[in-house]
Image (spheres, grey):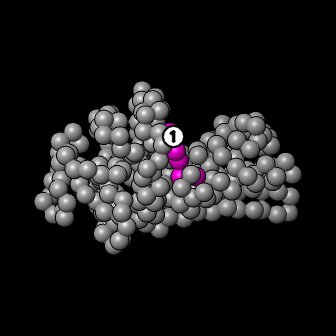
Amino acid sequence: MTNVIMHGCNGRMGKMIASIIDGMDDVKIVAGVDVYDEGKNPFPVFKTITDCNVDADVVIDFSNASAVDGMLKYCVDKNLPVALCTTGLSDEQLNEVKETSKKIAVLRSANMSLGINLLLKVLKQEANKLANEGFDIEIVEKHHNQKLDAPSGTALALADAINSSLDEEFDYVYDRSQRRQKRPHNEIGISAVRGGSIVGDHDVIFAGTDEVVTFSHTAYSRAVFAKGAVAAAVFLKGKAPGMYDMSDVIG
């Protein structure tokens, strides 16, 4: 049994994770943390994690950046591994995450989807074969009209995975409207589409002479990110200190 503290239990993702875990026999939420206690949770809810006095095996964090510092300190004090899913961390916080990983196990990924992380693994292994044969590389990502950042962190992670297999020799290009020239080979074009309620859609296009190879991932529900977070929590139980990501989970 993996006993979980859900940090941010009453947020959209926290509720989804709780719903998924509710149907599992080998994972249990033993406590939640949220400033808003709706009184509907089947587990005790604390306003701050420092108030939590419930023993657990791991913390899943889907909260906000302002709550991460206290959460990391708590995890170190309690020797608890953490699946860190909160985004928008400052450079100072990211440095603190690295320091924390020297003391406890920390898992952090740009995207918690198992499918996306399998795609990242494939691209790291195979992208250079297509690029070296002259295939041009384009990434098109699509998200809902409420998303603030562009391109998505996942699109950048996909580009980084590709570039890591190309000795970091390719440049990222986000806009070609101000230039009039043929496309150079050593670039990765990244385009963002925003509209409607698209959860997340990523296409990695390798365009060659007379053929095109496309790697695609579509998230139809945020549940894919919740499932990934739960898989990460189960993976982290009992792990030694260090920085982990979802590639470690999928093996």
Residue 122 seen in this snapshot: yes
Image spot of residue 44 (x, y percent): 17, 56
In terms of depth relative to the viewer, which is nearer, 85 or 146? 85
From this view, report whether residue 225 is shown above or below residue 22: above
Q: Residue at x 77, y 56 (%)?
A: 207
The segment highlighted magenta reads 242-247
Q: Residue at x 46, y 60 (%)?
A: 231
In the displayed structure image, the side of residue 27 where residue 154 appears, left or right? right
Q: Secondary structure at mark 1?
A: strand
In the displayed structure image, the side of residue 70 where residue 118 appears, left or right? right
Residue 16 seen in this snapshot: no
Q: Is residue 243 magenta?
A: yes
In terms of depth relative to the viewer, which is nearer, 44 or 218? 44
Image spot of residue 14 (x, y percent): 31, 57
Quarter in which the C terminus is drawn: bottom right
Q: Residue at x 19, y 64 (%)?
A: 42
Q: Is residue 181 magenta?
A: no
Residue that sits furthest to the top in the current view? 92
Q: Residue at x 31, y 63 (%)?
A: 28
Local packing at callout 1 (Cα closer than 10 Å; few below 14, some 14-19, many 20+) is some
Image spot of residue 18 (x, y percent): 30, 63
Q: Disc 1 designates what residue?
A: 243
Image spot of residue 138 (x, y percent): 69, 51
- The amino acid sitting under disc 1 is Met
